[in-house]
Image (cartoon, rainbow, N blue to C red):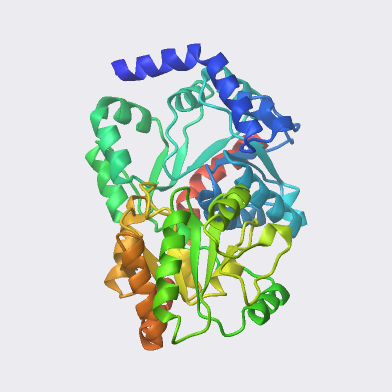
Amino acid sequence: MAVLRLYLCFAFLAAPLLRFQLRQRAEAGREEPHRLPERIGHASHQRPSGALIWVHAASVGETNSVLPLISDMLAADEALHILLTTGTVTSAEIVASYQARDKAAGQRLIHQYAPLDRRKWVMRFLSHWRPQAALWVESEIWPNTVLACEAHGLKPIMLNGRMSPRSFKYWQRFGKAARFLLGKFALLTAQDDMSATRLRELGLAEVATPGNLKLDAPALVADEKQLADLHTAIGTRPRWLAASTHQGEEEQLLMAHQMIGETIGAQMDKLLTIIVPRHPNRGAAIAEALGKHGVNIAQRSKGEMPNADTDIYVMDTLGEMGLAYRLADIAFIGGTLVPHGGQNPFEAAQLDCAILHGPHIENFESLFTDLASKGATAEATDAATLAAQVTALLNTPTTIAQMQNAAKDYSAAMGGARARMAALLRPFIGQANEARHG
């Protein structure tokens, strides 16, 4: 517990540093400058009357996974309001897109940026919003926020909890603090058996496993006209996709592109590599860096389409991952060639891609393992092995088809997590309704 006291003391003293970091992030485009007050607990909206449930989703993946559940909750109670907090600009844009698509539900969904984990700021946030329930997606365990909730008589619920090997090792070192904080949750749910086991090994006996919300979300959508236009622009050229890439991967992808091109050059048309960065605002830097190596780049955020001379197409736009996955039969999942831990491969599986990945899969270890056991994925260790795998797949369409079918069958077999999660939440949502009427 000494480490927890040290953390709380540091957070108390760190206000100037945290404010400075927020300003730096805003200058880098990672925060919205006019909304920085939200990060220190100042609300930019009035609280609506009646019951309000607070849902927190850290970033894009968590936001996409919980929005369908939010839709269900809003549909079940027309008087309910939901406050959804996130921590990234991209996730805020996804929420705004949802609100624009579903105007009726969107009017009862309020987005705010989550306050940083400093007691004064969290208490200010909670005093304004006064939520009747708090649902936190995956592994958001912030000490000051947990304790501030307790001070407001609020016991949070962990939705779709994930405990990666890295997080597990960290919390094992501070087992007493982990048990103290997690013991203040009203309900813990884990997205898979591996995460549930790790939570139990930390000393939490009651952990529910309703399934993974990320595996029960609808397939990503795509604009049919834009998809047709891109297929026309690309034609019959061989192509592969690198999805949700992180800094340090694009250079390796370029090396792979060049090696694949050299191998298939005499047999096929010119290769097209499609890169979708995890953070679209990196698109210009990626295009500039790769362009220095003499390859032809087209950048989607500039309105450019790939042509016969394009080597690499950088799709640095928001909300078009569904479009990208439909352009290629082969999809490499980013964040796995660098020690980031990988992004979610399930979206690629839903859209019938043969999936490739690097060795760093800690964030979605269970999912990658399941997909591999079905024959839907293959692992590359570096640019050379990635190039060899893409080349082999391009030369053997039957193998692509086998991996696609395996991915499709696996994704079809998943489902039901949302309904099971809703059943677990019903008593807590009922309490929120009682508070509204009380």
Nearest the eye: 260 or 26: 260
| Quarter of the figure that contains the N terminus | top left
Asked which quadrant contains residue 237, the reply is bottom right
| 32 horizontally vs 159: left or right | right
Q: Position of residue 268 (x, y in %)?
A: 48, 85
Total count of labels: 0
Q: Position of residue 242 (x, y in %)?
A: 48, 63
Nearest the eye: 423 or 400: 400
Q: Position of residue 420 (x, y in %)?
A: 45, 59
The residue that appears at 61% across and 70% down in the rendered structure is: 310
Asked which quadrant contains residue 222, the reply is bottom right
Q: Is residue 102 visible?
A: no
Q: Position of residue 187 (x, y in %)?
A: 41, 41
The residue that appears at 31% across and 25% down in the rendered structure is: 177
Q: Is residue 340 visible?
A: yes
Nearest the eye: 334 or 214: 334
The residue that appears at 75% across and 33% down in the rendered structure is: 45
The residue that appears at 58% across and 35% down in the rendered structure is: 132
Nearest the eye: 377 or 10: 377
| Quarter of the figure that contains the C terminus | top right
